[in-house]
Amino acid sequence: MKIIPLDEKRMVAHFAPGIDIPLHPFFGSMGNAPPESAGRFNSAPPWIMGGNMDNKDLVAGTTLYLPVHAPGALFEVGDGHAGQGDGEVDITALETSLIGTFQFIVRKNMHLKWPRAKTPTHHMTMGFNDDLNASATLAVREMIDFLVTEKHLSRDDAYMLSSVAADLHISEVVDGNKGVHMMIPKNIFVSAPAK
């Protein structure tokens, strides 16, 4: 595969004759230590501490929120990808070396069960399980919790809004636990709710 710069802002990978893939760099793995109760933990499957999420929407400019389960959190990052389709279906993406700059802020007022994120355009919740349906259920439940807690909706309204305005994406299916993330656009929240 050959990387071809088209201009300063757009690069593509030449996959094969007639097939060029736009590059979209991101780290496939970002997480911290699992709870001690998990014992020895395989680093391949993503879980409640993040890890190998392979989520192509976690790009520069995104805020990732991770529950902390160990003193010092023990953050890790790696698995650089120049591009990947949703799902990473054959255990690989356009693998590359990446360098990033990270800012860490401890939010003691947040009590998360699962990773969440905020992209420049969307709020995101995630679920990881070895069953894809269970992963989707977790991502939806986390979105409902986000909308209740942060946007002050009732649980029923949050559930309905998740159905009419949020999108479910399969992050990855190759690392043991399947990843699903749900994204809701920030721009639908046009004003403060009436009191």
Image (cartoon, grey):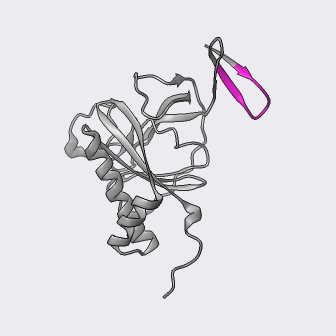
* Residue 173 point in image, percent of width and height: 35, 32
* Spot occupied by residue 5 in the image (x, y as percentages of width and height): 75, 23
Which corner quadrant holds the N terminus? top right
Residue 152 lies left or right of residue 16; in this view the side is left
Foreground residue, 15 or 83? Answer: 15
Q: Is residue 139 above or below residue 6?
A: below
Span shown in magenta: 4-13
Q: Does the magenta stretch include residue 10?
A: yes
As drawn, the residue found furthest toward the top would be 17
Would residue 108 be seen by someone viewing this image from the given angle? no
Q: How many marks?
A: 0
Tell me, yes or no, whether the highlighted magenta stretch contains residue 47.
no
Q: In front: 64, or 107?
A: 64
**Measuring 26% from the left and 34% from the top, which residue is drawn there?**
41
Q: Nearer the viewer, residue 4 or 48?
A: 4
150 relative to 60, above or below: below
Residue at 75% of width from left, 35% of height from top? Answer: 9
Task: Give the percent coordinates (x, y) of residue 36.
Answer: 24, 45
Can I make out residue 38 in this image? Answer: yes
- Describe residue 131's horizontal placement relative to residue 33 as left or right: left
The picture quadrant where one finds residue 176 is top left
Horizontal side of 18 relative to 182 (left or right) equals right
Tell me if 83 is positioned left or right of 180 in this view: right
Residue at the front extreme, as displayed: 164
Seen from this angle, which residue lies furthest right? 7
**Residue 172 on image: x %, y %:** 39, 34
